[in-house]
Amino acid sequence: MQTIKIQSNDKISRILIGERLENLSRLIPAGQVVVITDTNVSRYYGSKFIDAEIITIGTGEKSKTLKTVEEIYSRLLEFKADRSTFIVGIGGGVVCDIAGFVASTYMRGLRFGFVPSTLLAQVDASVGGKNGVNFKGYKNMVGVFNQPEFVICDPRFLTTLPNREILSGLGEILKHAAIADAGMFAFLEGNYAKALALDLPVIQKLVSDSVMIKSSIVNRDEQEKGERRKLNFGHTFGHAIEKTAGISHGEAVGAGMLVACRLAARKGLLARSAVKRFKTLMTRLGLPTDIKGKPAALLDAIHKDKKREGTKIHFVLLNAIGSSVVVEIPIKELEAEIADIL
């Protein structure tokens, strides 16, 4: 097992790579525990849960709403939860986001931890302290920064995932390599087939490298005032594509990254050969490279992006494979170029 730490202002979050769900009880304090999970995870792994109050929500982004949060608050009241209650989110990114948001806001804050059940959640949603829900169809519009006390990355969860969920997680892994680690990108190029086959040493290395990249950035910029914005590479277009094209988060982020690479090449920041290399790896990983979606709908989503400030938006571009920069781009400029890029 490998432990990676994230230091926030008042606590340390531990990411435990290779730890087992069965050891969860060793990490939580004595007292009342409430597990928040979803119907799929409960069906596959409910028999392995610790003795706790269980709240089961629906699956998918449709459940990531304030209505779901309100229903969980009501259940916590029924359980007579108080400030000593510990919340554990066991599930994918939606469960982790909701559990973290609920724990951070109920009675002004409860302690909490995560057991992410998807590859995407293990390398992204459960790490870094962003917790939130969607609002009126727009991603993560309501939320908080608050670190879980621990994250258990149990590789056995991945064996029951559908292929599309694996691809979604590999999209985020590709993002981490692209923005910060040329060596990791090269490793993924040489081992993409093993990654797709869930070869344990390869997957654990990719999860570990991804968490190391994200945790080091979060340690330097927890509140996303500067460098942490790099973790949004591909997400400006990605969230818009996800909303308008109906594909998964990881697939949409992959498509968004390719759009960002093309934009970087148009601006003279990134070599055309690097764009080709990026697209080739996306194809080998099975991520979509043909971007669907109407420019007007994409622009509407971009106008509502959280990274927008006035008439400009903080946009992440590559200046080389493994190196990235954050630039301010006028939204008018994106409007002028988006049709050509797509």
Image (spheres, rainbow, N blue to C red):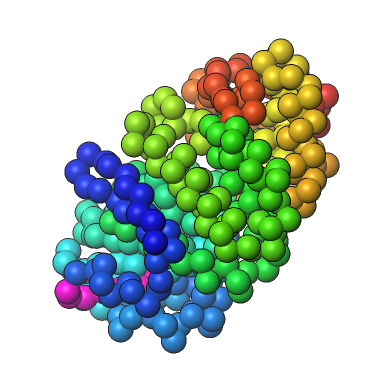
- Between 281 and 134, the one lying in front of the other is 281
Magenta span contains residue 31: yes
Tell me if residue 218 comes above or below residue 195 in the rendering: above
- Between 155 and 290, the one lying in front of the other is 155
Magenta span contains residue 33: yes
Residue 67 in the image, given as x and y percentages of width and height? 45, 62
Residue at figure coordinates x 66%, y 45% from the top left: 188
Residue at figure coordinates x 39%, y 66% from the top left: 19
Residue at figure coordinates x 70%, y 43% from the top left: 189
Tell me if residue 191 comes above or below residue 161 in the rendering: above
Direction from residue 54 to residue 85 in the image, left or right? left
Tell me if residue 205 comes above or below residue 39 in the rendering: above
**Is residue 233 in view?**
no
The region drawn magenta spans 30-36
Residue at figure coordinates x 33%, y 74% from the top left: 23
**Is residue 24 in view?**
yes
The part of the image, by quadrant, that contains residue 337 is top right
Residue 217 in the image, given as x and y percentages of width and height? 41, 34
Residue 247 in the image, given as x and y percentages of width and height? 71, 53
